[in-house]
Amino acid sequence: MLKPKVAVIGCGNVGMRYAHSLMIGGAARSIVIVDVDVERAEGEVLDLSSGMPYIVSPIEVSSGTYADIAGSDLVVITAGRKQSPGQTRMALAKDNVDLFRRIVPEIVKHAPDAVLLVVSNPVDVLSYAAYKFSGRPSGKVIGSGTVLDSGRLRWLLSCHCGVDARNIHAYMLGEHGDSEFPVWSRAMIGGILLDEYCPVCGKCDRGDLLEKISEEVRTFAYKVIERKGETSYGIGLALVRITQAVLHDQNSVLPVGCLVADYYGINDVYMSLPAVVNRSGLRQILRPRLNDVEIGLLKKSAAEIRNVLDECGL
């Protein structure tokens, strides 16, 4: 068996964009794809395999059943029902929680040592569900959280400021959803706090611009879905970044979904905070000092997630 090995549960658009990006990037040596639509999974593997002569390093891609995920270092869950016309977000959450009740025990049965990375939406609710249904330590269950949202924030700032996005450190925290918020008080460009950088830059009315960028990040997915029906490329690449941190034991700081306990009075919800991610999963959850406005936004976000959890019986 080639290692490291990654299992992808669900071969929809997100699962396959991720598998494709992972194959090109070369972070894994083996990828196995599991889906209830067996023929679709087989077809996706055949399609991916056609490009094998042109990738950086050899990789084994296959489809199979839960039994075939044995020995996986990382299991990435993208399976989930999509929101139907007229269906409420709450109804969708309940449907996907019921789905997780069935698939998570199967994952743990066949890949008991793997780190679980939850991507399906609503990701904060389902990350908590995976943690509960798996019986595993919370550090072994990661939500994709706001890694994608934070990437959008950094990109929008880079476009405005004319600075490489890789030199911008800024996070969207809280829920992966409408109540997420940017932590402007901790944002930095080239090691300089944004509060100090903006007066030197002098390119804009800072208050108006930051509010505009905040709103653009929160509504980004809606704009993409309106135009093409789904979002998948960005999250595929964001998932590869998390995968690299796990498989290569990088100790990378990423804003992933994690179990929050005793942070500004918040307990027992999964939501995004900066965390050190490595081979073991979550090594450490960081707790940045927030200002009063940001604390209020974080508590509001946590309350919204907890309400959905309660409605789902979690």
Image: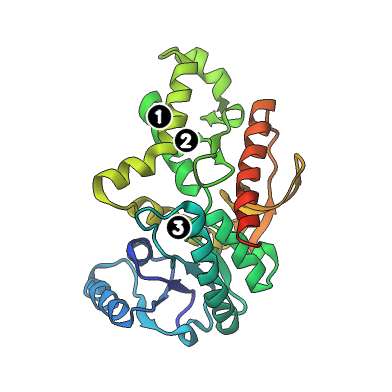
Q: Nearer the viewer, mark 2 or mark 3?
A: 3
First reached walking from the N terminus: tag 2 or tag 3: 2
**In the rendered image, which quarter contains the C terminus?**
bottom right
- Give the camera-side residue of 9 and 302: 302
Where does the image place residue 295, in percent across and percent down from the top left? 68, 33
Disc 3 is placed on an element classified as: helix
Q: Using the rendered image of the protein, determine whether residue 210 is visible from the camera's viewpoint.
A: yes
Circle 1 residue:
163
Can you tell which quarter of the image residue 208 is in? Answer: top left
Circle 3 residue:
239
- Residue found at x 61% / y 64%: 129
Label 3: how many residues lie within 10 Å, few (<14), some (14-19) or many (20+)?
many
Disc 2 is placed on an element classified as: helix
- Residue found at x 57% / y 54%: 124
Q: Using the rendered image of the protein, determine whether residue 279 is visible from the camera's viewpoint.
A: no
Distance (Cα) linking label 2 and label 3:
20 Å
- Give the camera-side residue of 171 and 167: 171
Disc 1 residue type (three-letter) = Val
- Give the camera-side residue of 106 and 51: 106
Distance (Cα) linking label 1 and label 3:
24 Å
Q: Residue 151, relative to residue 78: is it above or below?
A: above
